[in-house]
Image (cartoon, grey):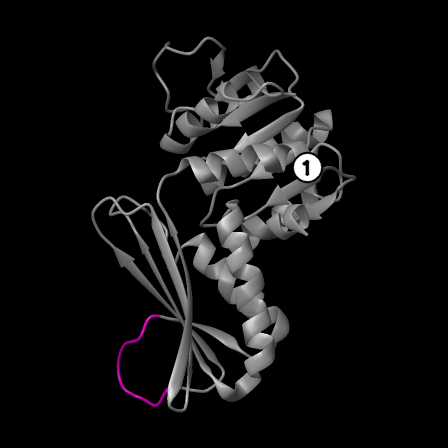
Amino acid sequence: MKILIYGVGGTMGHYVRLSAEKTDDIQVLCGVDKFYTGNEFSFPVYKSTAEIAEKPDCIVDFSVPQGIYDYLPYAVQNGIPCVIATTGYSEEDYAFIRQCSEKIAILQSGNLSVGINLLLRLVKETAALLGNSADIEIVETHHNKKKDAPSGTALLLANGIREVLPDHENHLGRAGVGKRERKEIGISAVRGGTVVGKHAVSFFMDGESITLSHEAENKSILSDGSLTAARFIVKQRAGLYSASSMFS
C-alpha cells in the first residue's frame, strides 16, 4: 500500500514515516506540507494536493484542522480513502467530513492507540453499569506545545460516555461558584513539559471511587495505529468510521 502523509514535516508526520519504514507492506509515496522547506526525504513533498502527480492508496493526516479543505476534495475526486488523526475540529469541520464520507471511506479518531480504545470500551461499560449513581470527571495532561484543549482523546472518551448516558453533557473546566450537577461529564486539561499524553476517567460515588487511566510513553503508538487504520480503511466502503471499528 502506498500512502500520502498529510503534514509530513510535522512531529507526527515524522513518526508515521518511521513507522512505515518498519513495515513490509506500506510505502510512503509522497507527502504534503505547506510549511515544509527541507529536502531530506526520498519521496516528493508538495505544498498542496493540487500539485500531486502520483495517486496514493490512502491518505494519513496528522496536520491542522484546516487541512481537510485541501485534501478531502482531492480524495473524493480520486476515490482515495483517508485516515484523519488530527484534532481540534469545529462542528462545521465535522459536517464537512461527514459530507465527504458519503463518497469515500474515512476513519476519523482523536486517538488511534490500542490502549486508548480499550480504555474507551472499559469507560463505556463502567458508565453503563453505574448509570446516574456516579459523578464522572476526565483529566487529560499533555506537553506544553499542544494547541487544542481539551484533547481530542478527552472528547472521544466523553462522547463515548454520552453514547450510553445520553442525558449527560460535557462540562469544560471548573470556574466560579455553584453546585456540580449530577449529569455533567467534567473535563479538565493540564499542560506542561514534554508529557506525551495522560488520560484518567474517574467515577465518584458515595464513599468510593473508580479511576480508569492510560498513559502514552511515546508517540509511535499513534503512528503505528494510523497505519493499522490505513490497512483497515482501504478495505471499507464509503462511510465514516471510528477507531472502535478496527478493534471490534
* Residue drawn 47% across the image and 28% down it: 16
The image quarter in which residue 54 lies: top right
- Can residue 82 be seen in this snapshot? yes
133 displayed left or right of 232 = left
Residue at the right extreme, as displayed: 237
Which residue is rendered at x = 27% and y = 86% of the image?
177
State the quadrant of the N terminus. Answer: top right
**Residue 189 picture location, percent across and down:** 32, 61
Q: Residue at x 64, y 49 (%)?
A: 247
**In the drawing, does residue 242 fall left or right of residue 87?**
right
x and y percentages locating residue 228 in the rendered image: 60, 35
Classify 241 as above or below 1: below
Instruction: Give above or below for 77 relative to 102.
Output: above
Secondary structure category for the residue under label 1? helix
- How many numbered marks does the figure carry? 1
The quadrant holding residue 38 is top left
Q: Position of residue 231 (x, y in %)?
A: 66, 32
Residue 179 magenta: yes
Q: Is residue 49 shown left or right of residue 12?
A: right
What amino acid is labelled 1 in the image?
Answer: Phe
Q: Main secondary structure of the magenta part?
A: loop
Q: Position of residue 118 (x, y in %)?
A: 55, 56
Q: Magenta segment: does it hold 184?
A: no
Disc 1: CA contacts within 10 A as few (<14), some (14-19) or many (>=20): some
Query: What stretch of residues is rendered in magenta?
Result: 173-180
Q: Please tell me whether residue 184 is drawn above or below residue 6 in the rendered image.
A: below
Q: Nearer the viewer, residue 45 or 73?
A: 45
Residue found at the very far left of the displayed protein: 193
Q: Residue at x 39, y 59 (%)?
A: 199
Q: Is residue 33 visible?
A: no
Residue annotated with mark 1: 232
